Image: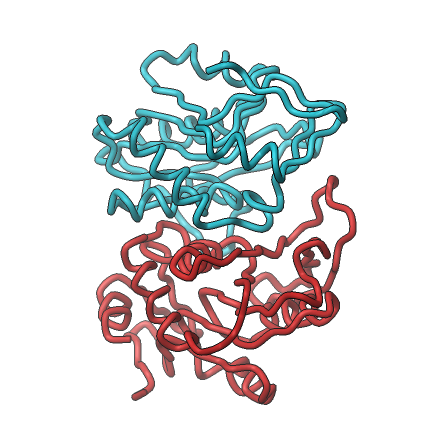
Chain colours: A red, B cyan
Amino acid sequence: MKKLKERILKDGKSFDGGILKVDSFINHQIDPVLIKSVAMEFVRRFGNLPFTKIITIEASGIAPATMLGYLLEIPVVFVKKAAPKTMENMLVSSVYSYTKDRTYAICVSADFVTPADTFLFIDDFLANGNAALGVEDLVTQGGAKLLGMGFIIEKSFQKGGALLREMQHIQIESLVRVKKLSNDGIEFEED
Amino acid sequence: MKKLKERILKDGKSFDGGILKVDSFINHQIDPVLIKSVAMEFVRRFGNLPFTKIITIEASGIAPATMLGYLLEIPVVFVKKAAPKTMENMLVSSVYSYTKDRTYAICVSADFVTPADTFLFIDDFLANGNAALGVEDLVTQGGAKLLGMGFIIEKSFQKGGALLREMQHIQIESLVRVKKLSNDGIEFEED
């Protein structure tokens, strides 16, 4: 996705250790017009799949998931990172975060993940794939189907992409794939 | 907002103790088409104010804020409830949550809240107003201006509405105002 690559080169900040900061336009301050273009690209890539709902995980996935849900006129479910006191009938899984070096619980109401639902998972980053696997577990627990996973940015030098692509019944799409990040700059995969 | 009232009556669940659950269409599962109508109503109510950015607080505010930012083609900043390790140059405030009976930190990068910015704050609920006051504090710390605050649902039997309306330089709008919630049902204000 050319427009996204250009924006990452213009406003993203890369650092040694594989760090990419896109917090001026994706995950802290959001450019909603770019997010709409991102959502439209997801429509192009996943438009043939018969999913009936989007699923994402708070907080950075909510903007692209909502925009995609709006374009397709289908509901968006967002998985929570802490169980609200008022939530009953929950599905729970756990995710190990390398960034924060801790395991955290994720949860979703079983009312919104049922055998009648087929999902597309949307998130901002694919790195080690742990959050995606946690959501896949929740969808499976609810008896629903997960047909696809779409990411705005994949760090192809981390293991998540290969891990998720082993699940051959799930279509995996990343709008841009980054192969190297350092203080010297950002290198994209050729695709 | 008639469409929103009808949807709350149809899909909302109210309980004794002033509890309203709208998690099937606003704050856990999202109906993005309704959220677009909500955003359009915010455009009508705030369209004359010269704000340049939207500000919201994770996670439930992100969907309506993003949709409004998209309609107006302006950036959306979302305040975080925990400080990411990678964030520098932060503004921090604290919010007391009655629901969770604890005080939590909220933070935003000072890069996105500057004297050049004028904000509209958007959130799903107005109850005691503490989250809104925390965001107002962050905006003030950054030297920015806060011109308006828009809420999807106000619990008018709680003190937040009166508290925020004392700040006469800030326009406060709630799309629906709920005056009573119990196991017997939902009563709206007449407005």
Q: Please state the horizontal and vertical placement of residue B107, each as a whole percent of the image.
A: 47, 40
Q: Is residue A24 above or below residue B122?
A: below
All told, the count of numbered labels is: 0
Who's the residue at 65% across and 24% down the image?
Answer: B186
Camera-side residue of B144 and B131:
B131
Q: Please state the horizontal and vertical placement of residue A151, each as a whole percent of the image.
A: 45, 71
Camera-side residue of B63 and B112:
B63
Who's the residue at 45% across and 47% down the image?
Answer: B63
**A80 left or right, relative to A63:** right
Q: Please state the horizontal and vertical placement of residue B78, each as a whole percent of the image.
A: 42, 44
Who's the residue at 45% across and 42% down the image?
Answer: B79
Q: Is residue B55 above or below residue A183?
A: above
**A101 left or right, relative to B121:** right
Q: Is residue A105 above or below residue B180?
A: below
Split into 4 quadrants, where in the image is the N terminus of chain B?
A: top left
Camera-side residue of B30 and A73:
A73
**B11 left or right, relative to A31:** right
Who's the residue at 58% across and 89% down the image?
Answer: A168
Camera-side residue of A57 and B136:
A57
**A140 left or right, relative to A186:** right
Q: Please state the horizontal and vertical placement of residue B54, each as a whole percent of the image.
A: 34, 39
